[in-house]
Image (tube, rainbow, N blue to C red):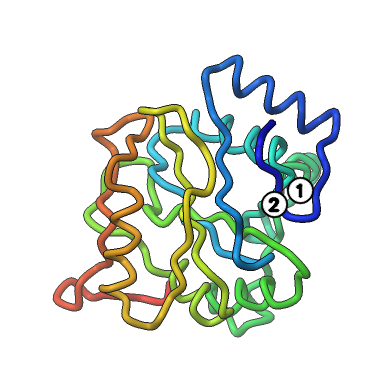
Amino acid sequence: MSPLWPGRQPTFGSRLAVWALRLAGWEAVLAPPPSLKCVGAVAPHTHNADFWPGIFWTWATRSPARFVAKRELFFFPVGVFMRAVGGLALDRRRSGGNFVDAVVGIIEREEEIMLAIAPEGTRSRGDYWKTGFYYMALEAKVPIAVTVLDWGRRRVGIVGYVTPTGNLEADFAKLREYFQDVRGHTPANETPAFPRPASAGGPSRT
């Protein structure tokens, strides 16, 4: 039996998703969440193929996983598909154009949500993680769900949580411990879990 989000019961659809994952050799993991709201730091995101274990994990665990995209992308018929797989249309104008503030507003209005963010910001290798996800969790006062796409061990899901304290370097060190042995679909494209240093213009709330 695959782990389920608190308060959920298995359904035919969730059982089917578990079966599909196992058929492909994957294991759905879900550490018990300390809160019904969290920001999921999803990594390593190195290939378009990451979508499939991710969406089947959502169905298998019945987690309230969502992602945000700008409102303009939700045009018909693309918007129908995006909403069906957890997409939320984001209107930055309501928060003065600030992405982090707009997302914090979404988290605050939902009764439960696991907001999935890919902090690498690209499927190609970069130098640093973007830190917007960190400030979303910090300002919304929710934990960061460490969400792995581990192609090495064929595991997908939440393996633990980090509560942001405002000490960015110390909290990122905790995140690195969780991701230390996790391998992406294309390891050469993995971006190390370090925030952009001040000498390089970081960190940033965006």
Q: Is 109 in front, or is 91?
A: 109
Depicted 72 relative to depicted 97: above or below: above
Residue in the image at 60% along x and 84% along y = 96
Amino acid bearing label 1: Arg
Residue in the image at 66% along x and 41% along y = 3
**Residue count near mark 1 (Cα–Cα under 10 Å), binned few <14, some 14–19, many ≥20:** some
Depicted 121 relative to depicted 162: above or below: above
Q: Is 143 in front, or is 118?
A: 143
> Which residue is labeled 1 in the image?
83
Q: Position of residue 193 (x, y in %)?
A: 29, 56
Residue 53, numbered circle: none
- Judged from the image, the secondary structure of the residue bearing numbered disc 1 is helix
Residue in the image at 52% along x and 73% along y = 137
Give how far apart the Cα atoms at labels 1 and 2 are: 4 Å
- Judged from the image, the secondary structure of the residue bearing numbered disc 2 is strand
Instruction: Residue 6: name its quadrant.
Output: bottom right
Q: Position of residue 38 (x, y in %)?
A: 59, 65
Q: Position of residue 111 (x, y in %)?
A: 78, 69
Q: Position of residue 93 (x, y in %)?
A: 65, 78
**Dividing the image into 4 quarters, which one contains the N terminus?**
top right
Instruction: Residue 206: name its quadrant.
Output: bottom left
Amino acid bearing label 2: Gly
Depicted 180 relative to depicted 17: above or below: below
Depicted 169 relative to depicted 158: above or below: below
User: Do callouts 1 and 2 mark residues in contact (Cβ within 8 Å)?
Assistant: yes
Residue in the image at 31% along x and 66% along y = 172
Instruction: Residue 85: name its quadrant.
Output: top right
Can the viewer see residue 69 in this picture?
Answer: no
**Residue count near mark 2 (Cα–Cα under 10 Å), binned few <14, some 14–19, many ≥20:** many
> Which residue is labeled 2 in the image?
87
Relative to 76, is 196 on the left or the right?
left
